[in-house]
Amino acid sequence: MDFLQQLIQWVEVGAGGRWVKRGVAVLGVLLLAVAYNWLGYRNMATAEAMDMAQLGRNIAEGKGYSTSFIRPLSVHRLFEQNKPDDGTPLTREKTKELMDKPHPDMANPPLYPLVLAGLMTVVPFEYVIPDKPVPFFRTEGRFARHQPDFLIGLFNQVLFFATVALVFQLARRLFDKGVAWLTAAVMIGTELFWQFSVSGLSTNLLLLIFVGLAWCLTLMDEESREPRHNVIWPFLMAAAVGLLVAAGALTRYSFGWLIIPVTGFLMFSTLRGRFALGGVSLAAFLCALLPWVAYNLTVSGLPFGTATYTVLEGTPWFPEHELQRSLEPSFEGLSLTRLCWHRLILYGRTLVGEELPRLAGSWVSAFFLVGLFIDFRNPAVRRLRSFTLFSLLTLAVAQTLIKTQVSTDSPVVNGENLIVLAAPLVLLFGISLFQVVFEQIEWPIREMRHVALVFVVVLLSLPMILKFIPPRTSPVVFPPYSPEAIQTCGRWVDRDELTMSDMPWAVAWYGDRQSMWCTLKVAAPAGESTTETFFAINDYLKPVKLLLLTRLTMERSVVDEDAWNNFALTCLVAKQPPPWFPLRAGQPGWYPHFLVLTETTSRILRPR
């Protein structure tokens, strides 16, 4: 009896009440995660997510930093880098030798694939889709969720929860518990963050790094006014800040632009030796990044691999994905200055008119803009707000410079969405201003204040709530992605054989097979000679054993007779490929979603 009384007293007046509240909050978040994963989860839907996943699997399986998603542009760079010193073309034997080796990845920074590789080593991933009914992963006997996709999504949700906890502590340090709890609740209820969490992209890791960066800068700013450590501590923190930016750049190259506002923050701080601190941060950033740059120069001859060409993609010179699909790209007549200006004007309109208003996933971002004119008493708040603003501007400029067809294919949830990285801090400052306004309201009874706060959180979380209302979202992103069908096609070829597809990232991830991105043309037009054809790969580099075309190709407008969509239309009308095409056997019954061609029917009928 005494124990029960002590327990009640501990909960009501002691520290137990605080732990009960925390327990209820954690339980609520876990229930929300279960509900979202059951009703709103979707398999991977972006090329970058599948590319990173297959790269992580190759690392986990001991294949080194090699990729199964082969871009013709990376083949071009591989051959250029391995040319003899006298500049003579590679021999047929040398090109065959290079194509038979594991293809080095030249498109992705290494940190996120390495993190995924560690996850795949620790957690049992089942890449082969089972035929037997598996609860949750098969509904009514049909395939529903890809287990590796789901596990990667869970991992990113853990990163998201860690980011929320870090933002909560930052808000509590700079403001009060009310702002902290409201900011955490709004973040948890913002569907945009959940969409990124299950996308398979590296965004959640970058969000955690960015908020960690803000934490370090806040601690350093407080140290400048109330010194608590020895003189070495600020330099160690400056080095940590530089390493954090480098970690972000090694997760997504464009994150490295944040070294500009970070260095500026340190150099304009009130810390003793602020210019030296800025130099230490910059030096730590470069020391961590330069070894990877040196590796890229060795493999591809470019500091950031094929990602160095990103600024050229999606422009009138290289529309859509043409540059990545080029075996012999020509850069004659290009002006980089003119190109960057063209990007800033063209994509800046979309950024300002459409993307910035929905930055934080709700109208709270409007409070952030108004809050720029509020003179907060706490100097740490003012300085972090300035850092957030200049980081947002830096990320916005970087986003306009790297925007490609990827952003067109998936306008919001994509790896080129950089401004979303500032969303947690934007939410924090927006909620802080809302709290200031909210506190001015006089409520007749105290309980009405709590009801009003709950109503605000529910209103901001309305897009998330609507996810749980029928009709349910299909977890399979089809068309064009059908993990089960792609894995079936993958069984028709051996691991060391080459396939070609208009979605090679999906063939590499779901099918676990080496896949080349479709060349620009099927065959050379009559009377012309070009290397941008299927036969330049099949006849001279490595035989293609399977061709997989999807709606990504078949639903495109007709451009010329040598385009892949015209080829697909010819195959479907004639019910067979043209007589000059080497892959003769097709898989009937998959149209209009897939056109699959192999060498012989025996490949299709081979046992699993």
Image (spheres, rainbow, N blue to C red):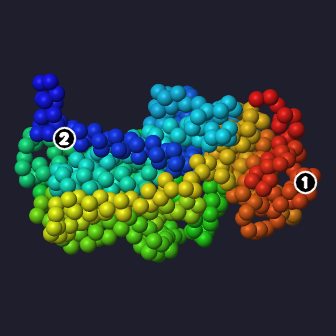
Q: Is residue 232 above or below residue 391?
A: above
Q: Is residue 465 above or below residue 121?
A: below
Asked where in the image residue 262 lies, by quadrant, the reply is: bottom left
Residue 56 on image: x %, y %:
53, 37
Residue 606 on image: x %, y %:
82, 31
Q: Is residue 338 left or right of residue 204?
A: right
Q: In terms of sequence position, does the residue under pointer 1 or pointer 2 come before the other? A: 2
Instruction: Residue 51: give its label.
Output: none
Q: Quadrant of the N terminus?
A: top left
Q: Is residue 86 visible?
A: no
Amino acid, disc 2: Arg
Q: Is residue 200 left or right of residue 588?
A: left
Q: Secondary structure at mark 2?
A: helix
Amino acid, disc 1: Lys
Q: Determine which residue is flagged by label 1.
A: 575
Residue 518 on image: x %, y %:
71, 52
Q: Is residue 78 visible?
A: yes
Q: Determine which residue is flagged by label 2.
A: 18
Please tell me which residue is depicted at 52% across the width and 53% down the height of the picture.
307
The nearer-to-camera label among 1 and 2 is: 2
Asked where in the image residue 492 lies, by quadrant, the reply is: top right
Q: Is residue 128 above or below residue 577?
A: above
Residue 109 on image: x %, y %:
47, 45
